[in-house]
Amino acid sequence: MRELAYLNKHFARYKWHLLGGIVFVAISNTFAIFPAQIIRYAIDFVQDSLMVFPLFNEENILAFYSKMLTRAILLFSALVLFLALAKGFFLFLMRQTIIVMSRLMEYDLKNDIFQKYEDLHMAFYKQNNTGDLMNRISEDVSRVRMYLGPAIMYTINLIVLFVMVVVTMLSVNAKLTLYVLTPLPILSILIYWVSRKINQRSERVQRKLSDLSTFVQEAFSGIRVIKAYNRLSEREFEFAEHCNDYKNTSLELVKVNALFMPAMILLIGLSTILTIYIGGLLTIDGSISPGNIAEFVIYVNMLTWPVASVGWVTSLVQRAAASQKRINEFLKIVPEIQNPTQAPFATQGTLAFKNVSFTYPDSGVKALKNISFKVEQGKSLAIIGTTGSGKSTIANLLCRLYDVDKGSILIDNQEIDKINLDAYRNSIGYVPQDVYLFSDTISNNISFSTTIADTDEDAVLQAAKDAQVYSNIIEFPNGFETRVGERGITLSGGQKQRISIARAIIKQPSILIFDDCLSAVDTETEERILQNLKRIMDNRTTIIISHRVSSVKHCDEILVLDEGEIQENGSHDELMKKRGSYFEIHEQQQLEAMKA
Ligand SMILES: Nc1ncnc2c1ncn2[C@@H]1O[C@H](COP(=O)(O)OP(=O)(O)O)[C@@H](O)[C@H]1O
Ligand SMILES: [Mg+2]
């Protein structure tokens, strides 16, 4: 329950919905109690009349009385009908306030969580799998909503109804009340037990279902491999097994579900029988009227659902508390990377690493060791090295996706963790090594990095031309409006890389970072892109990361990285003269190019 306290501040925001809900519950319950009293009155009235009638022998007086009686019964019926409608109307209003409140709070909560996710550091995404993150925001939030809406609504309803009905019952006859209410606690406990079982089993069903869909999804994504290796029948067999599992757990659930209604009806029946039996004895005594029995039967029926809901609500609240606990665990995490200031920062583009060391927090891999270099504003720096030498790590640190362990990174001579992070990131154009395109049109993927974008078609075209992808795009039937990703066309690795480059350059940033983004492009296209980049790189600080000499040789300064350390640095000519490892890489790649 402590976990659910987090939600109190949300309740405060929607207090009028809640208060309105409570008032409507009270009103609708009042309208529910009157009909029982009218029915008691009607029955007693009819019975009295029937006792009085035989005393009159006159034909026409009898006719007159029976007409009166019919009228009275019609009137009573109309009243009961009207009260039922009034009750229904206020029930509607109750749902409109409390359930609406729960939906609004659900919306807030989802937004809170999503915002938190976005703020969290990269290591967090490494530690938690996507499925977990999705569950928090969808399933856990829906369970919490069941507490915010139905659980609260039924609790208020129960309290109000219980007090009203029991007070009315006691005013009629205390002994009868006591007898009639005895089976109800048993009902609560039973329903609690049954709904716990139902929840446990439906969770198991849910898990099996998600196993099943994961399996199917994998089968479809990997259909090429499955067909090529002719594993169709094995897959079918596995699928049948998953289905069987799912079926069996579902049947388990059906068994408890089947118990639910009969158990409830049995207990209601028990209460009704008790009412009639004890009520009958009391009527014979003369302490209550036959009308009271009818009245009590209605009360008992009114109480059963709310009393049953105690058990149901208890299990809802338990589930919600467990979900909220999981949500709170995420909400409690403090993002490691935070924006230290809102002060404006206009990035010029002078970059420096000073004795930077960095170890990945999750894997413990020491990726960079005592790295120092400086790039003046508008100059270009190349980083070359084998895979795993730490090139991408430098790019990650420059985007401040991670903070350094030792040493410091200076942007325009200010420490990177002291400047306005939003402003700084807005001035970077970063092409990551693993290109990511959203399931959207090519045009929107390119203009993603900017705000003016959508309207400025020319800029998108120009960026595509500079990235040497324009001619590919216009060959698609829908050109720039072609959708990529899941339901769109499949682009080649090189095309994706070039769209990603277009995304970076359309932004016209002060700092450009290209992380191995020409690896899937042939050398001719590479050369053309580099030619175009020369114009764009003018006056922008550029970092080009690659393992190919052809990509880096035009840069002002080249770092050769090996196992997280700088092996050599200098311009292309200097390094070639030096005949060190850069020279070796160069020779080897020349040789390969000749062979190809
Ligand atoms: N997100 C990460 N979490 C943990 N370890 C990582 C991560 N990214 C890279 N590494 C490790 O850090 C080292 C340097 O990686 P990286 O900078 O990607 O090399 P490069 O880009 O030169 O191929 C590698 O040993 C790699 O396994
Ligand atoms: Mg890399």
Image (tube, rainbow, N blue to C red):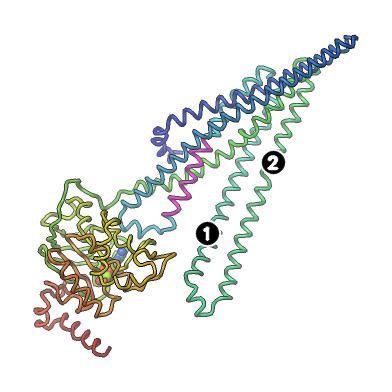
Which label's residue is closer to the chain start, 2 or 1? Answer: 1
Foreground: 318 or 518?
518
Foreground: 549 or 299?
549
Quarter of the rendered image showing ligand 1? bottom left
Percent coordinates x, y for residue 26 in the rendering? 55, 25
Percent coordinates x, y for residue 317 in the rendering? 51, 40
Task: Please say if 22 is above or below 320.
Answer: above
Q: Secondary structure at mark 2?
A: helix
Task: Say which residue label 1 marks.
Answer: 210
Task: Magenta stretch: give its range.
Answer: 133-152
Tell us which disc is closer to us: 2 or 1. 1
Foreground: 11 or 178?
11
Q: Secondary structure at mark 1?
A: helix
Q: Is residue 452 visible?
A: yes
Badge 2, how many Cα within 10 Å: few under 14, some, many 20+?
A: some
Task: Say which residue label 2 marks.
Answer: 263
Percent coordinates x, y for residue 106 in the rendering? 44, 42
Q: Are marks 2 and 1 in contact (CB under 8 Å)?
A: no
- Residue type pointed to by label 2: Ala
**Magenta residue check for 124:** no
The residue lying at 23 percent from left, 69 percent from top is 466
